[in-house]
Amino acid sequence: MKHIYFVRHGLSVMNEKGIFSGRSETILSPKGIIQAEQVGRQLKNYQIDYIIASPSQRTKQTAKIISKQINFKINKIVYNELLLERDYGLLEGKPYIAGLKDYDGIETIEDLITRASKAWLILKTIPADNILVISHGAIGRALRHVINPKIPFYNSTKLNNAEIIQLI
């Protein structure tokens, strides 16, 4: 039976400062590096045989740290732009606003869910039993909603940094 696990990247420098960092490049904070190491140790028993991640710096860092922990070859990590974080447009680099829905100039929820649906189509075709997706909060919630429509995108449980969520 196929299992798909999701991990949001470790805490980034911009997360730590409480500012929007959707498509902005930011690295993991020292705490985020520790989180990635810890979640990697937790994943040792999951027999991960495929890793797919967002190509953002913070997810690449997280993926590489996890890979080392679980003895997965770093050059086997697949990066896919469908897993990029929501594009916050003019809000990038500005203080975070909780509960943000649609806002002029940012990627709409409809577009985000469409992108998550495309990612889901790819995930379903991967010939692996234990897939690890390493990505971001908003796209992770959208993907979770696409896979299980009973879990709403809005008002759903936040995806914490470096937390393992089983999608299927």
Image (tube, rainbow, N blue to C red):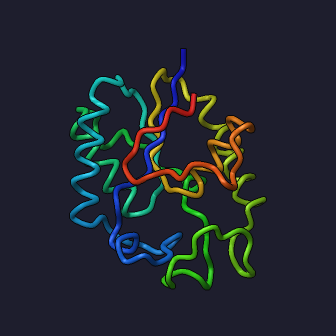
**Residue at the spot x=57%, y=48% of the render?**
157
Q: Position of residue 62 (x, y in %)?
A: 33, 52
- Describe residue 1's horizontal placement relative to residue 151 as left or right: left
Screen quadrant of the C terminus: top right
Tag count? 0
Furthest residue toward right: 110
Q: Position of residue 77 (x, y in %)?
A: 39, 42
Quarter of the figure with residue 100: bottom right
Screen quadrant of the N terminus: top right
Furthest residue toward top: 1
Q: Position of residue 23 (x, y in %)?
A: 52, 71
- Describe residue 161's horizontal placement relative to residue 85 as left or right: left
**Residue at the spot x=72%, y=77% of the render?**
103
- Describe residue 35's horizontal placement relative to residue 112 as left or right: left
Q: Position of residue 64 (x, y in %)?
A: 29, 48
**Residue at the spot x=67%, y=49% of the render?**
116
Quarter of the figure with residue 31: bottom left
**Residue at the spot x=48%, y=38% of the render?**
165
Say if 24 sits above or below 49 in the image. below
- Describe residue 74's horizontal placement relative to residue 166 as left or right: left
Closer to the camera, 63 or 16? Answer: 16
Say if 49 sits above or below 122 in the image. above
